Image (cartoon, rainbow, N blue to C red):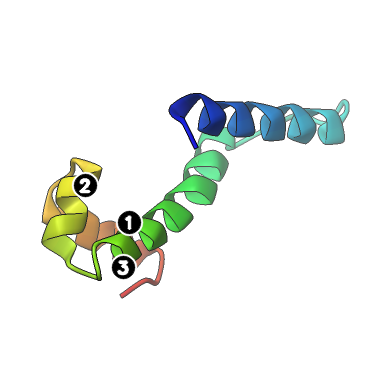
Amino acid sequence: MSKDSIQDAVHKNLEKYFRDLGEQPASNIYDMVVLAVEKPMLEMVMSRASSNQSQAADMLGINRNTLRKKLQQHGLL
């Protein structure tokens, strides 16, 4: 799956979200999208890195401490 495919999937799902909302006001969209994408991304990267946090952090381009914090937030530790 390419970067464009991921962006297309997010775009299509947000279109559906807004369509389903109808006239209701939207709120907390940023947090909703980040939480929906972040957990499965972390799960996949940790699996690919055989649960090696240093390797996973390198793959993600983030600090290992930041990765650890995010894993804890999502109940993955």
Circle 2 residues within 10 Å: few <14, some 14–19, many ≥20: few
Mark 3 vs 2: CB contact within 8 A: no
Query: Is label 3 in a helix, a strand or a loop?
Result: helix
* Residue at point 69%, 35% (across, down): 13
Residue at the image position 62 percent from the left and 34 percent from the top = 9
Residues at circles 1 and 2 in contact by the CB criterion of under 8 Å: yes
- How many circles with numbers are drawn on the protein? 3
**Label 3 or label 2, whichever comes before in sequence order:** 2
Give the amino acid at mark 2.
Met
Is 77 placed above or below 4 here?
Answer: below
| Residue 72, label in figure | 3
Determine whether, in the image, residue 33 is placed left or right of residue 66.
Answer: right
Give the labeled residue for mark 1.
45
The amino acid type of the residue labelled 3 equals Gln
Q: How far apart are marks 3 and 2 (CA)?
A: 18 Å
Q: What element carries label 1?
A: helix
Q: In this view, does 67 lie above or below 60?
A: below
Q: Where is residue 25 in the image (x, y as percent from the top left)?
A: 76, 29
Quadrant for the C terminus in the image: bottom left
| Percent position of residue 59, x then y | 21, 47
Q: Considering depth in this image, is 10 or 74 the residue closer to the camera?
A: 10
Which amino acid, mark 1? Val
Label 2, on which residue? 59
Percent from the top left, x then y, of residue 17?
Answer: 75, 35
Is 47 or 13 nearer to us in this picture?
Answer: 47
Tell me if 25 is positioned left or right of 61 in this view: right
Name the foreground residue: 5 vs 71: 5
Report helix, strand or loop for mark 2.
helix
Q: In which quarter of the image is residue 10?
A: top right
- Which label sits in the foreground, 3 or 2? 2
Q: Earlier in the sequence, mark 1 or mark 2?
A: 1
